[in-house]
Amino acid sequence: MQSAIRNARKQAIETAKAAEVAPRLIRAKDAVVIMGSRQVVRDCEAAGWLSAKVRRHRLTLYAVADLNVCADRIDRGEYPKK
């Protein structure tokens, strides 16, 4: 009986973990981690590759999809021109 309950709990936990949703917007400090440096993020913004979806006093949010596109372009050998 207890082993069945344990198995059910494990299954429920695994299902919950699989259902976690990745964030669509991330903070500027996390964007810097993804892109490698602040300057790369600034250069991508200056070139028009990246734009903040939310820009407030102490909060800047970028779309993860936009960051992935920028990272893919840099991986292909492009670098944003100012």
Image (spheres, rainbow, N blue to C red):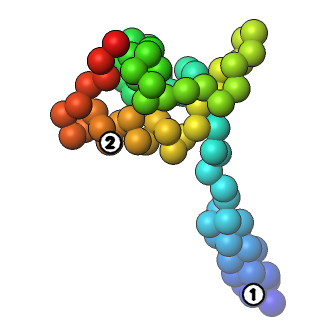
Image position of 39 with respect to 7: above or below: above
Query: Does 5 sit left or right of 82 as displayed?
Result: right
Quadrant position of residue 24: top right
User: Badge 2 is on which residue?
Assistant: 72
Query: Does 36 sit left or right of 53 as displayed?
Result: left
Q: Earlier in the sequence, mark 2 or mark 1?
A: 1
Crowd around label 2: few <14 · some 14–19 · many ≥20 (10 Å): few
Image position of 72 with respect to 2: above or below: above
- Identify residue type, mark 1: Ala
Whether tag 2 and tag 1 are in contact, CB under 8 A, the answer is no
Quadrant of the rendering where the C terminus is positioned: top left
**What's the CA distance linking mark 2 and mark 1?**
46 Å
- The percent coordinates of residue 78 (x first, y second) are 23, 31
Instruction: Name the residue rendered at 28%, 33% in the picture.
Output: 74
Instruction: Name the residue rendered at 69%, 19% in the picture.
Output: 55
Query: Does 2 sit left or right of 55 as displayed?
Result: right
Q: Nearer the viewer, residue 45 or 7?
A: 45
Instruction: Name the residue rendered at 59%, 31% in the picture.
Output: 62
User: Badge 1 is on which residue?
Assistant: 4
- The percent coordinates of residue 40 (x first, y second) are 37, 18
